[in-house]
Amino acid sequence: MTTDPSAARPGKIAGLVLIGVAAVSTVLGVVTLLGGNGDSEAGQQPQSSAPAASQPSVAPPSTSGSSPGSSSAAPTTTTTTPPVSTTAAPTSTAPGPGQGPGQPGTPSTKDQPVRIYNNSTIADLASRAQNDLKGHGWNVVETGNYSQGIIPTTTVYFVPGTAEEAAARALAAEFGIRAEPRFEGIKDSRPGLILIVTKDYRGAAGKE
């Protein structure tokens, strides 16, 4: 049996057409797929890399006063200083207890302790001298008798180079007597002036 070639040709043509359609569809699918990805990426909103606009900063209020152009000034506090008196308080120049004349706060020479000893046959001569010295502000701390020798004249004795020396000379001038450094017999006695009175003692200078 012989097959007619013309009868098989339409079937081949139809098969070729289907293959071509399939190929075209495949190509279109690929293109669509690629185009769809591009469109998707293109359709997305680009993210801006620029920083977001910052809010305008508000400067803190100035503590030194209102800024230029300000219509209202900060209230000003006025402090009234009371007037200062230029009159100095009077200063007392009178010496206090134990202070020398004109030398406030400094010890007086009369603060030196004085011990009085009688070197005569006159009874209570040391006590009489004690009353005289105390009456003139001297610090008499002891009275007694001195019998270790004969003192030729009433004399006040001191330790040289100490405050006793100035005090002894002041006492000698006030009572008209002698002032001398301590001698061997009394050099180790307690600190202070040693007044040895004899029969020539007359009290303060000018006193009868």
Image (tube, rainbow, N blue to C red):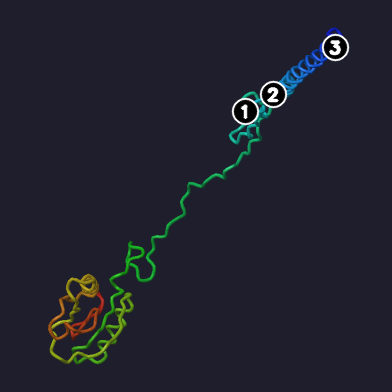
Count of number-bearing discs: 3
Look at discs 3 and 2 and give the one toward the viewer: 3
Query: Tag 1, which secondary structure?
Result: loop
Please report whichever mark, 3 or 2, sits nearer to the chain's N-terminal start.
Answer: 3
**Distance from the alpha carbon under mark 1 to that under mark 2:** 44 Å
Residue that label 3 marks:
3
Q: Position of residue 24 (x, y in %)?
A: 77, 15
Q: Which residue is mark 2?
A: 46
Q: Is residue 27 left or right of residue 206?
A: right
**Which three-letter amino acid code belongs to the residue tagged 2?**
Pro
Quarter where residue 19 is shown: top right
Query: What kind of residue is marked 1?
Result: Ser
Taking the image as shown, residue 44 lies to the left or right of residue 108, namely: right
Q: Quadrant of the N terminus?
A: top right
- Out of 83 and 102, give the one closest to the viewer: 83
- Locate residue 33: give its quadrant: top right
Give me the C-alpha separation between circle 3 and circle 2: 67 Å
**Disc number placed over residue 67 in the picture, else none:** 1
Instruction: Find residue 205 and report its horizontal and vertical position in percent.
Output: 24, 74
Q: Nearer the viewer, mark 1 or mark 3?
A: 3
Q: Is residue 25 above or below residue 198?
A: above
Q: Determine the secondary structure under disc 3.
A: loop
Q: Decide: is 116 above or below 164.
A: below
Residue at 31% from the left image edge and 69% from the top image edge? 108
- Residue 205 visible in this rendered orientation of the protein: no
How would you rate the neighbour count of disc 1 (Cα within 10 Å): few for under 14, some for 14-19, many for 20 or more?
Answer: few
Name the residue nearer the viewer: 40 or 11: 11
Say which amino acid is labelled 3.
Thr
How many C-alpha atoms fall within 10 Å of the one at disc 2: few (<14), some, or many (≥20)? few
Mark 2 element type: loop
